[in-house]
Amino acid sequence: MQKQLLKDSAVYLSGSIVVQVMGFAGLVWLMNYLPVAEYGKYIYIVEFISIFAFFADGGFSQSIVKETSQNPAEIQNIYNRAQSSQILISIIMLLLIIVVSFPLNSTEDFIFLVIYGLSVVLSAYFAPMLAILVASGRKDLIFYKDVALSTLKLIFMGLGILFKQPVIYFIFLGFLNCLVLLLLHFYIKWKKEFIYFFRNKVDLSNSLAFMKQGLLFTTLMAANIIYNKIDIVMLEKMSGSVEVGYYSGATRFIYPFMFISTAFMTAIFPSLAKHSKNTENFKKIQYLALYYLGGIGILLSTTLFFGSDIIFSTFFGNKYDESIPVFKVLVWYLAIVFIYGSISNSLVAQDKVKFLVYLNLLMIAVNVVINLMLIPVYGALGAAVATIVCEVVILVTAGGYYAYVGRTELNKEN
């Protein structure tokens, strides 16, 4: 079992490495091409929309993967309900983007937000398809999709820089994701193993029940994304696009490494869900994730911390020197989140989603309060300190609760 889990993780990691390298190259080009303030504006648009994109980013996807892994014979019905739900969700998502964006932004920013938001909403339609591909073990198709998308983005981003296009050009590149997903949809149409993708019926009555069933997953994803993105929005509103640019400049060498944790846990989660009632197998899988991810996270954080000055001078000269102090704080995010990722996914597999929802909702409030105190004085550095403080609190709390759950289950067995 361990060899298979590592093999599945390797498939995800290989695809993710290619994706991250190309994505990183494209954004480094963009950071060097755009003034800091314009790059900050671009990041603000992307991050603002991501707050509303929790439905597309796995809110229901994790629920689909869990249910499909545990009930493979029901895959047709699961897909019917999930796809019908996604139609309703996408409409709600678009309305939320428009209603919330309009009063909080300038006319220009509102237009940018609607354009990018529409690309995310259209891509969200295919979320159930991707979730079932993961649960079905067709990670190769996810690999090809990710590589194709990253290649297209890199090419069109390079063309935009070559022909000196404005910021709005790069915002329109969000529609490339819609194109790649549509091509994948047409490709699997000819595969008999996925015939149920094209036998689906709109089932609005059961879709509402499915939405209710997956509500905890969705709330967890929403709380998690809002918690992680709110600092960018607060920086934009309280300190301006330049501070957003410097903050994002620091994260540019941190967040790309998150693919390791994401890929590893995406590969392992179906097995966690499948063996959630088998304590011995469950612990083996969970400890495997914890040891590997924890070690990798600590090693990455330490290496990046000591190499920060060289990294920024190599890629940007002195353009992003203001990002270096921010980077030295945020770099410990990797060590913390890699450890937390294995704990949180284990809790989800054990149906302890409600605890994670409450924890993330509480930490949103704490994060906002700390940011309100630190951003006006320290700008991007203050937002970085707020992030690390909150991450430490989350890790300690989740770790303590996981240990408590483990002891409780052990006592039941004895």
Image: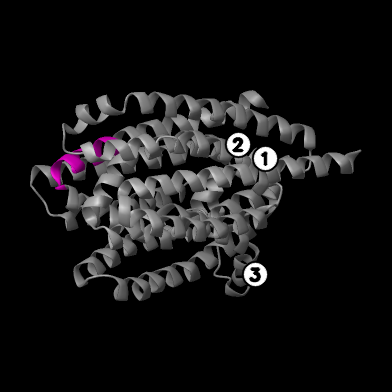
Query: Which residue is disc 3 drawn over?
Result: 209
Q: Give the side of residue 414 with respect to residue 151, left or right.
A: right
The residue at which mark 2 appears reads as 268
Q: Residues within 10 Å of mark 3 (few under 14, many from 20)?
A: few
Going by the picture, which residue comes out furthest to the left? 163
Residue 9 position in % (x across, y down): 53, 31
Residue 1 higher or lower than 391, as above or below: above
- Category of crowding for the residue at label 2, using alpha-carbon neighbours closer than 10 angstroms: few (below 14), some (14–19), many (at least 20): many
Residue depth check, mark 2 versus mark 3: number of the one nearer the observer = 2
Provide the secondary structure element on which disc 1 rests: helix
In the rendered view, would you say 175 is above or below 148? Answer: below
**Tag shown at residue 272:** 1
389 within the magenta span:
no
Q: Residue at x 51, y 39 (%)?
A: 337
Of the image marks 2 and 3, the number of the one nearer the N terminus: 3
Q: Distance between the residues labelled 2 and 3?
A: 27 Å
The percent coordinates of residue 260 (x first, y second) are 47, 33
In this rendering, position of residue 355 left or right of residue 98? right
Sequence-earlier tag: 3 or 1: 3
Q: In this view, does 407 lie to the left or right of 321?
A: right
Q: What residue type is labelled 3?
A: Ala
